[in-house]
Image: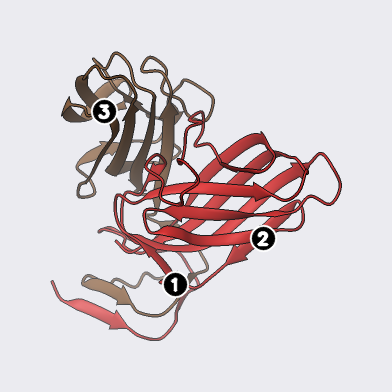
Amino acid sequence: MGTKFITENLLVSSDATIGGEVIGSKEVIMFNASDPTSILLGQTNNSVVLTRAGSITGYTLLINISSTTMVSGSFEIEINESPVWVLALGTLNLLTNKFSDTQPRDTDNFVAGDRLRVTLPSISFFTNAIILVEIMYDD
Amino acid sequence: MATKFITEQLEITSDSEVQGELNGSKDIIHFNRDADTGSAYCEAGEVTTVGDSHSGVPTVGIPMVRPGSVTGMSVRWAGSTGGTSGFCQLHTPDGFLFGVTLTSSVDITTQPRYTDEFSAGDIFAAFITVNGVDTMRDIVVEIEVIYDE
């Protein structure tokens, strides 16, 4: 089977149906926590093993603080337990703190079988945290 | 870089490979709740304090990475009494955005893209109401979205 190449940007203003495989798709993985020492995937404190190669393209982070004592720290997205995308959070406010960012594809890459997790080091306490990590697969 | 425009429906019968950025992809946002009567926000994984005061303006929930629109919702639940019914709503900073009436153990609704839109950073919270004295358990809510970028 031959391959048709489109080297410009492609804008489809109507519907698109792909009968074969989609190579280069996005996914969002949610982490959550009610304890800084245990950031969960569902109910499990572990990394997710990535099924395919790809790169990290975005995140959102919501931290809720109920104590009147101000805290600060950082947010880290890690591949194989090594930080690849680090955000210094500064001093967090009482109640809700929200952070988000995106970056181009292929900035922070991973291969199939790599482990993805997030950490909030140096933050001693919070009420809860909800984190989305957006990834784009290469195949 | 120039842009190639396709205004008709596009059907690719073989594989499609995107080597640049992919704008306009689908995603599923998950909520859950063990059991409930009355009205309450569903949980985001282990985080039980999603939503606040049932006002429809949540400050705790799942923040969206990119702008987009809500295109579907499914709710799977088990009722401990017969005839359980109710509804499930998606609450965002703009208030009630989308919902489904619960009439069976599996309820699904979809709508066209761009009907209910959201911005990057908007917070999602799933609010469920059980009618009467019925009890629901093992509630799983999935929100389908299509991102704009």
Image coords of residue B146 (percent x, y): 42, 62
Give the left or right position of residue B15, taking residue B105 as reference: left
Give amino acid for label 3: Leu
- Same chain, labels 2 and 3: no
Distance between mark 1 and mark 2 Cα atoms: 18 Å
Instruction: Tell me residue A52's x, y (percent).
Output: 41, 41
Q: Is residue B107 left or right of residue B127?
A: right
Q: Nearer the viewer, residue B89 or A14?
A: B89
The residue pinned by badge 3 equals: A94
Front-most of B26 and A107? Answer: B26
Discs 1 and 3 lie in a common subunit: no
- Report the Cα–Cα distance between label 2 and label 3: 36 Å
Q: What subunit carries mark 3? A: A
Disc 2 or disc 3, which is closer to the eye? 3
- Mark nearest the camera among 1 and 3 is 3
Residue plotted at (44% across, 76% down): A15
Which residue is denoted by mark 2 in the rendering? Answer: B101
- SS state under label 3: loop
Q: Which residue is mark 1?
A: B115
Q: Is residue B69 visible?
A: yes
Tell me the brown chain.
A
